[in-house]
Amino acid sequence: MGETHMSGYMAYSESSCTSAQKCPAVVIIHDWTGMDDYEMERARMLGNWGYVALAADIYGTGTPLESMADWGAAASAHRGNSTLYHEKIQAALDHVKTYDFVDSTKVAVVGYCFGGTGIVNLALLGADVAGVVGYHSGISPDSRVLYDPTTSPPVKAKVLLHSGVMDDDATEMEMLAQELESANATYEIIRYGKDVYHSFTEWNANSPGSSMYDQRADVRSWESTKHFLNEVLMTPSAPVRGPESASLTAMLKNYTAADGTLSEGYVAYDASMCNASSPCPVVVVVQDWTGMDSYEKERARMVASLGYVAIAADIYGFYTPKADMNDWRTAATAHRANLTMYMERIQAAIDEAKTYDFVDASKVAAMGYCFGGTGVLNMVLLGLDVAGVVGYHSGISPDSVAEYDGSSMEPITAKVLMHWGVDDNAATGVDVASLEQLLEGAGATYEFARYGSDVPHGYTVFDSPSYDERGDVRSWQSTASFLQEIFHGLPDASRNNDCPSPTVMGDNSTAATSMSPTSTGMGENSTSASPTTAETSGASALLPGLLTAMVSVMLISTA
């Protein structure tokens, strides 16, 4: 047996997290450079959300970390020995549960780069945690555990992976998705583009074409993580619905397309917020293949409740038959085969909305479902002037997507957000990968989210056999923050870089493959590496927001 000394960094609110009022815990697994200022700052950020955050030291004190060669050696030693790596993460989990202010039944794990590989392994090996979040995780088959449905344990943790399109290979990501499908895992994979590389959340990353900080991907992924941790550790959000309400003005509005087709749209807005003196951004809701009906009207009211004007567009036209599946197929096929007509019908709804004095005509977005999801994607590929589009279970097979010729068309300026179930036969992994490359070439800013397992086409349609509550909730949360961004600007990236001197906590006991419980004290573990200057403060360190920070010195025994 060998002994490894480890110094984790903990941040939490001493007033909120007590033995009488325990808090959930989040363990952070560091990137390949080791546990340093970056992970400590992320711990403080999580502490500000109400969690006990422990940035774990996987390599151990005394491990050389002075150069890239050192980082490579330390990371390779763990990637090449998944058992050792897993034992060390498990030790951190066992350790954080020993604190009397931690709710040991509510623990999640977040990992970056090397640590992202670790959290994937943790989930695939069946660890008993509520959820795992990976950022720019190394997911190539030779870097991680492979899941075998005949021999591997059940995946208990919910999984959230954030990936730059220019980082993780699309084929390898799809391989992991299919493994998670076979494990019946609850998971989500979010891909960010354009030109989003490895280390996109690391504020100082600046190696062009390799490891680069990306503010938008950082902001979007952190917001997504906030909702995810609330789901797995606090209180899951209920689905948002849009019942008819006296607080909203809603009406049917006739308008005419360029070819003379009469359409009957549905407009919803809050007149107390959106009026001639205070016009609001507008969102055009593009129907699924059944036509504009009660579903799109409800979604329009949901958009209106976010503070926007919504118009549910009638793409087929008032007199088009829409009684059954044959009618739907006929109408949808006619528009898919004639993109000029389809785009004119969407543009007609936009033009109608811009005539209202309570609409800010400079701020227009579109969102679409199924047939409409294909439509809003083609809008940006064909150059319609909108700030952004959102698609849900959009059909993106090659024969559905408009051609984009970068040599003769301007780069795409509209931001793109797409949501699919992994089990959606209208958007296979190959189709998604192809669309990623199309949008990369078009210079678009985009984000693709896929939900599993067994999340099918039509997963947002309330009360249908395809409805998936979690996918609906997560995609609507994402949409709400996306609309806020495109209409009001991208928020600054969250930071907490105030770093007071933390208390040192330590213990001198050992345990096989587990971190030892610690007791409050100053440098009690005489066999550990010497604490740094920042670690030798004699008093509890209070962070902004009344957080407490401490270095927790631990000793584990490994084979």
Image (spheres, rainbow, N blue to C red):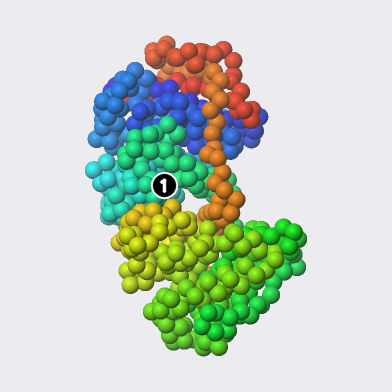
Q: Quadrant of the C terminus?
A: top left
The image shows residue 184, relative to residue 528, as above or below, that is: below
Q: Is residue 217 visible?
A: yes
| Residue 259 in picture, x, y percent from top left | 51, 83
| Residue 389 in picture, x, y percent from top left | 50, 61
**What's under tag 1, amino acid-wise?**
His
Q: Quadrant of residue 398?
A: bottom left
Q: Residue furthest front?
A: 408
| Residue 246 in picture, x, y percent from top left | 75, 68
Q: Is residue 465 visible?
A: no
The residue depicted at 45 percent of the width and 14 percent of the height is 532
| Residue 95 in picture, x, y percent from top left | 46, 29
The local crowd at label 1, few if under 14, some if 14 to 19, many if 20 or more residues have their Cα within 10 Å, is many
Q: Quick one: SS at disc 1?
A: strand
Q: Which residue is mark 1?
A: 162
| Front residue of this view, candidates 203 and 182 | 203
The residue depicted at 70 percent of the width and 66 percent of the height is 357
On screen, residue 354 versus residue 151, left or right, reads right
On screen, residue 496 versus residue 401, left or right, reads right
The residue depicted at 27 percent of the width and 29 percent of the height is 72
The image shows residue 363, relative to residue 68, as above or below, that is: below
| Front residue of this view, candidates 90 and 390 | 390
Q: Quadrant of residue 306?
A: bottom right
